[in-house]
Structures are given as C-alpha cells and as structure tokens.
C-alpha cells in the first residue's frame, strides 16, 4: 500500500512578502541585492509581482483547494519612515486578507521575515537602540489594522537563520563575521518575540502566536567519535535550542543574558517548524553524507528528520505543531512530488500533534542570496511574463488536499516515476 490518510492535518502554502510581492522599496535586501549581493544579480523588485496580482493569486489558491495561507507583511511598505504609516499600503494588505477570508482561506501572517526597512538599518537594525520600540509600534499597528481578518501571527520567521547568515557567516546582509553580534541579534529577537506575543494577546486575547523556527536534525558524522558528538551538541544548542527556549519560555540560558522584566512563562500558542534538512557534523563542520539524496542546492533530503525535530519540540514545548515551512529547491519539478510524499508520510505515521503543514513555497520565489534561480514553488513563475503555471507537484498537492491524503492512483501518477539524485 502506497496510500495513506492525513486526518486532522490541514494543508496550506507559505510565502513571504519580500520573496513574492515585488516593488522598488528601501529595505535591507533591496539595498544589498541592488549592490550586486545576489548570486544571479537579481533583486526583489520583480519577484512574483504578487502586489499587483493578489486577485489572480487568491483565485489560484482556491483552484488548488488551499485553505491555509501563510503570508508576510513588508514592514518598509507599511511604515516607509519611522512612525509614518502608509494608509494605501495598509489598505492593500487589508484587502488581501479580506479576500482570503472571503475565499474561505485562513491567513497566518508573518511580521518579520528577514527584511528590515532601510531607516531601521540606518539606526543599527537588530543591534541598534530602536528595534524594540519600532517592532512594538509595527506589531500594534498591524494587529489593529488586520485583526478583523487575522488572528494567527508569527512575529519573527527563522530568527536563528537571520542572525547566523547575516552576522556570523556573513553571506547575507550586513555581511558580518561575529559570533558576539550573532548572539546579540538572537537575544534581541527573543526579547522582541516575547514583547510581541504579549502585545498581540493584549489586543486579541484569542490570537494564536508562535515563531517559525528553522530546525535542523543534528547528528554526528560518527556516533562513536567524541569530537563529532561534541560538535553536534554545540551546534544544536547554539543554532536552535537555546534561542527557542528563550523565545518560548522566557528562560535565557547560555549564551544569552537574562533580560530585565521578562517572566519565565509560556510565550507560544503553537510551535512553528520550518524543516528542510539535516546537519551532519564532524570536527570540520557540516557535511552531507556520501550517497545521500540531495536537492538542487545540495541540501540533504532527509524526511525522518522532520519527525525527529518535531519530537524534541513536542517534549520541550507541548502543544500544537504547525509545519510552517517544508519544501525543496527542485528547478525542474522532477522530485518535488516524491519529497512531498516522503515528508507527509512521516507525519501520517507519527503520533505527534502536528496540525498544519504549509508547503514552501506557493509560487517560485525570490530566494535571497540565490536570487531568482532557485525554484521552490508548486506553481512555476515566468519572471519575464509573470505567468503562473501549476506544476505537477502542485496538481499532486491539490489532490492530497481534496482526498485528505495520498491515494494509490496519486502515488502511481505523481510519485512513482520520480527519483532523487544523490550526492
Ligand atoms: O525561502 C526560504 C524562506 O524565506 C525561509 N525558509 C527557508 C526557505 C528556503 O530557503
């Protein structure tokens, strides 16, 4: 039997503002990409031009039977200068979430997904003195303006990725190579998350608020090697566990300092998990094991890791789990259906309280430093014409939604012919 049911799992798709909206704005990433930062020289100004195609895209969501849509707000767009909100931009987002609701689609809204307004970058960004006040003002305004239609919020997407890629590895803006700064950014993110959690609940007592944590399945290259084991424990702790604990519980352990006025209590209503791959650590870093299935960016495809990370999350932070992102870079859509199948099969076989699964991404998206080249969507995007074409994996996803699981026929049609390539 290749079929399985997914009772109780709501399926949706995820996006972020910078990666699909398009538009010439003054943001952290427009500046960086405009100066030639992305590998293909592209910028987010084009992306999927979703800003001008909301109606068409909502129709496409409906056509695919999608009932849950994770989307982002572009901070620089709604607040182009400090404290000055743009009523037209806000009206646009109000129209979008109203249209989603009218179509029977529940929006889950991300406030910060990697991209600061330029004015806040100039004020020091996540390391500057203004971030907490500015984030609070932005959060309050968005909840007041969108709260009629939105009651599910993610204040910060993948705070660990933002901090490490930009401040430790230096491959994203602002290209710093400083462990101290990366830790300071994480500290600020955790404090901001907690303040946003409290503010949203003060404004909307029944809201559901959680972070979307980028979690990797960490393992030593050799289980018997003490160095590998230590590297794994250290990487796991500093990359994900310490930060998640601070955000979810208000308990700031090493490497953080205890902030004033933050009580230890629960600061999540669901645990969002963005899962993509595994980290296999030896003394010399993270390597994909030989002969592993890999995607077009060379990331290992390791479906059991989805449940491995959800299991520790469930033990540490009991409550509903939303897979807020799962997907892969497959430029020719030649293994995405198998990827979907393998990850959903893990959920079907597990006893964990996984309530939602948002596929990343809806359409192909502007993929940060990778630019336009890396394709994650279940809907293909022609960047020149902006035409959208549902991929086979999109048809498969729609079929899963319609049948509340994978049927035998769907498996034979979309999954059986596909193979992964190996490292
Ligand atoms: O595109 C990103 C997204 O912005 C955050 N999570 C991982 C995705 C794929 O790299």
Image: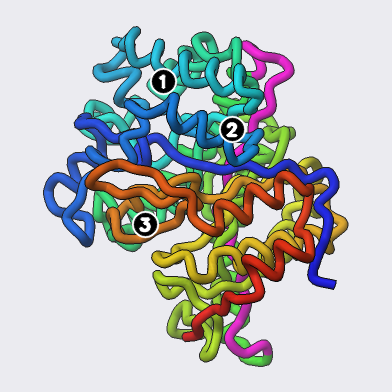
Characterize the local packing of mark 3: few (<14), some (14-19) or many (20 or more) Cα atoms within 10 angstroms: some
Residue hosting label 2: 62
Residue beneath the point at 14% across and 45% down = 34
> Dot 1 lies on which element?
helix
Which residues, given as a range, are shown in magenta?
201-223
Which of marks 1 and 2 precedes in the sequence? 2
Other residues around mark 2 within 10 Å, as few (<14) / some (14–19) / many (≥20): some
Does residue 368 show up magenta in the picture?
Answer: no
Task: List the single residue furthest toward the left.
Answer: 35
Please determine whether, in this image, residue 254 is positioned above or below residue 296. Answer: above
Residue 15 percent across, percent down from the top left: 47, 41
Residue position marked by numbered label 3 in the rendering:
165
Q: Earlier in the sequence, mark 2 or mark 3?
A: 2
Mark in the foreground, 2 or 1: 2
Identify the disc placed on residue 133: 1
Q: Is residue 160 visible?
A: no
Q: Residue 303 appears in which quarter of the rendering?
A: bottom right
Q: Is residue 340 visible?
A: yes
Cα separation between marks 1 and 3: 24 Å
Front one among 24 and 237:
24
Quadrant for the N terminus in the image: bottom right
């Amino acid at each position: 039997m290749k079929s399985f049911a997914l009772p109780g799992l709501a399926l949706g798709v995820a996006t972020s503002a910078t990666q699909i909206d398009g538009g010439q704005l003054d943001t952290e990433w427009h500046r960086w990409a405009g100066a030639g930062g992305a590998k293909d020289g592209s910028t987010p100004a084009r992306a999927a031009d979703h800003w001008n195609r909301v109606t068409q895209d909502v129709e496409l969501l409906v056509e695919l039977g999608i009932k849950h849509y994770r989307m982002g707000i572009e901070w620089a767009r709604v607040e182009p200068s400090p404290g000055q909100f743009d009523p037209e931009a806000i009206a646009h987002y109000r129209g979008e979430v109203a249209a989603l609701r009218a179509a029977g689609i529940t929006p889950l809204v991300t406030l910060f997904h990697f991209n600061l307004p330029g004015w806040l970058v100039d004020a020091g960004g996540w390391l500057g003195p203004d971030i907490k006040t500015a984030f609070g003002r932005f959060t309050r305004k968005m909840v007041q303006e969108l709260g009629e239609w939105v009651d599910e919020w993610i204040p910060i997407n993948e705070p660990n990725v933002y901090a490490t890629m930009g401040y430790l590895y230096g491959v994203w803006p602002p290209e710093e190579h400083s462990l101290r700064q990366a830790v300071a950014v994480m500290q600020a993110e955790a404090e901001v998350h907690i303040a946003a959690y409290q503010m949203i609940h003060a404004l909307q007592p029944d809201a559901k608020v959680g972070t979307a944590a980028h979690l990797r399945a960490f393992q030593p290259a050799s289980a018997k090697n003490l160095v590998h084991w230590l590297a794994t424990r250290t990487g796991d702790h500093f990359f994900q566990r310490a930060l998640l604990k601070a955000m979810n519980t208000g308990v700031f352990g090493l490497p953080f300092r205890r902030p004033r006025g933050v009580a230890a209590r629960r600061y999540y209503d669901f645990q969002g998990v963005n899962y993509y791959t595994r980290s296999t650590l030896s003394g010399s870093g993270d390597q994909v094991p030989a002969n592993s299935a890999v995607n077009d960016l060379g990331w290992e495809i390791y479906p059991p890791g989805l449940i491995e990370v959800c299991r520790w999350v469930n033990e540490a932070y009991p409550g509903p789990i939303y897979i807020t992102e799962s997907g892969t870079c497959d430029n020719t859509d030649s293994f995405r259906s198998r990827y979907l199948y393998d990850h959903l099969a893990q959920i079907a076989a597990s006893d964990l309280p996984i309530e939602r699964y948002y596929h990343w991404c809806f359409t192909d998206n502007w993929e940060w430093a990778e630019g336009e080249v890396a394709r994650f969507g279940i809907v293909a995007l022609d960047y020149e014409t902006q035409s959208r074409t549902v991929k086979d994996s999109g048809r498969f996803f729609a079929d899963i939604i319609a049948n509340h699981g994978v049927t035998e026929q769907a498996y034979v049609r979309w999954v059986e012919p596909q193979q992964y390539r190996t490292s």
